[in-house]
Image: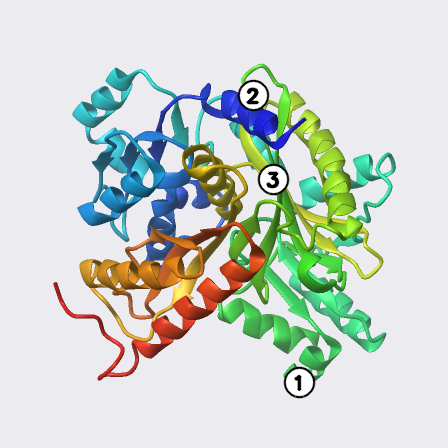
């Protein structure tokens, strides 16, 4: 299937190829699985700005935060959107979008009156929830991977063991460290890197053993106190180390591939992804093509199992590529994800501005200073002009976190070659860092 044909297939499966209502309920979904402190909920509310990119042509956005009108105008101009309804400010650090909708019958009626598909971040009620609750577990997804792997050469499923108790987790960790082995500790559920720790023998030794190290990770909120999984560590390889493959299960249960993305990971924390032609490497290298084909076949088999369990909608499988080129599946996500936004943006940019785009999303770029939202957008407008000199487009994706105690911004960069993306990213990072300079960094206040 050609790239155009594949895009048409998943778009039809996802929204019937039309416009949709997007609900930014990341915090609602996460609350089903992980602790929700006010800080965690606030970060999830910022991440919900990605609701703008759940499908290529949104009709309405329901957001916990209140974005500036300039943000939507900018996106609409670049992406040739028809007018988009924005219902913002629906939730704060102590509330969720679901609770806001429950308390606003007029807004629910307005959404229903649009008579369009409604797409949330992930399923929180109704048909399909049982499948989500089951396979979002890293233990259940591991079991599924192990059952399917024998029919898929090139797939390596890491060994995994349920610790059963914190004491046993500490013993297993110490024993593996004693054999010189790095270990991955996982909670059954986690998002964006929460609930996962990669621990080397040196880490265990520096902490004084497995038990004090686990106590420290628990107190820091990195891992839960109980219910840990002990997993074999798979060393990665180069740019292909962290791959993900996305697909969609249609209402009729058929499975439709979206594509492969190269994820950008800082430690265990997801920070963005690159999608598009040769995103995984040079087009003359057959390695990326083989990896993509291996991932696709396996993920479609996973999707058939998820569909049989009742899942409908977006999902992905994340992989680590080992030094021998084998793909080690690490988790399944039965929901939208950060890379999904990159795939959607690529589809829309190719449709509006011609085919061939690579898209890189960077979800939590540090800022050198706290900026109110409109000042941040002014800063990004200036950077967009600079990126255009390299043949790259800049689109703001998460504009609401610039005034946090630790300020960040999310952006997408689009170009037709890897060098342009790399150059534009370097310019953006340098300019964001320069905001710390009290004389040269800050843009003029509008």
Picture disc at residue 316: 3
Q: Earlier in the sequence, mark 3 or mark 1?
A: 1
Q: Residues within 10 Å of mark 3 (few under 14, many from 20)?
A: many
Q: Circle 2 sits on which residue?
A: 250
Quarter-of-image position of residue 388: bottom left
Residue 368: x and y in percent read: 33, 75
Q: Quadrant of the C terminus?
A: bottom left
Q: Quadrant of residue 179?
A: bottom right
Badge 3 marks a residue whose secondary structure is strand
Q: Is residue 254 visible?
A: yes
Query: In the rendered structure, are the residues bearing label 2 and label 3 in contact, judged by CB atoms less than 8 Å apart?
Result: no
Image coordinates of residue 288 in percent, x first then y, are 73, 49
Task: List the residue tagged with mark 1.
Answer: 206
Mark 2 and mark 1: span between their CA atoms? 50 Å
For the point 40% across and 67% down, the residue is 428
Select label 3 or label 1 by which is in front. 3
Q: Name the mark nearer the viewer: 2 or 1.
A: 2
Q: Residue at x 55, y 58 (%)?
A: 193
Is the N terminus in the top left, top right, bottom left or bottom right quadrant? top right
């Amino acid at each position: 299937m050609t790239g155009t044909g594949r895009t048409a297939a998943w778009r039809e499966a996802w929204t019937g190829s039309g416009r949709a209502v997007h609900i930014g309920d990341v915090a609602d979904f996460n609350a089903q699985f992980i602790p929700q402190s006010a800080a965690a909920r606030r970060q999830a509310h910022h991440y919900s700005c990605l609701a703008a990119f759940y499908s290529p042509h949104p009709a309405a956005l329901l957001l916990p935060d209140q974005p500036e009108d300039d943000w939507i105008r900018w996106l609409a101009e670049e992406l040739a959107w028809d007018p988009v309804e924005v219902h913002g400010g629906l939730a704060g650090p102590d509330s969720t979008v679901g609770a806001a909708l429950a308390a606003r019958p007029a807004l629910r009626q307005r959404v229903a009156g649009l008579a369009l598909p409604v797409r949330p971040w992930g399923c929180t009620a109704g048909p399909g929830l049982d499948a989500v609750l089951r396979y979002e577990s890293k233990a259940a997804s591991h079991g599924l991977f192990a059952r399917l792997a024998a029919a898929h050469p090139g797939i390596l499923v890491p060994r995994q063991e349920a610790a059963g108790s914190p004491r046993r987790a500490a013993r297993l960790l110490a024993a593996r460290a004693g054999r010189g082995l790095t270990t991955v500790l996982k909670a059954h559920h986690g998002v964006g890197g929460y609930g996962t720790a990669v621990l080397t023998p040196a880490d265990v030794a520096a902490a004084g053993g497995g038990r004090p190290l686990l106590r420290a990770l628990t107190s820091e909120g990195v891992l839960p106190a109980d219910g840990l999984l002990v997993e074999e560590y798979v060393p990665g390889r180069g740019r292909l180390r962290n791959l993900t493959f996305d697909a969609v299960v249609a209402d009729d249960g058929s499975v439709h591939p979206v594509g492969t993305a190269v994820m950008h990971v800082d430690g265990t924390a997801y920070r963005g992804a690159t999608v598009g032609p040769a995103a995984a490497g040079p087009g003359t290298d057959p390695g990326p093509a083989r990896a993509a084909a291996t991932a696709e076949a396996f993920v479609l088999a996973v999707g058939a199992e998820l569909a049989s369990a009742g899942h409908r909608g977006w999902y992905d499988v994340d992989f680590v590529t080992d030094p021998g080129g084998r793909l080690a599946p690490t988790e399944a996500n039965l929901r939208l994800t950060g890379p999904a936004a990159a795939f959607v943006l690529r589809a829309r940019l190719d449709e509006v501005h011609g085919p061939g785009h690579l898209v890189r999303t960077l979800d939590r770029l540090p800022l050198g200073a706290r900026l109110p939202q409109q000042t941040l957008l002014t800063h990004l407008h200036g950077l967009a002009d600079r990126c255009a000199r390299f043949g790259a487009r800049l689109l703001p994706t998460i504009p609401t976190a610039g005034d946090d105690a630790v300020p960040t911004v999310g952006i997408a960069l689009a170009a037709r070659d890897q060098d342009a993306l790399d150059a534009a990213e370097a310019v953006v990072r340098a300019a964001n860092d320069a905001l710390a300079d009290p004389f040269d960094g800050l843009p003029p206040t509008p």
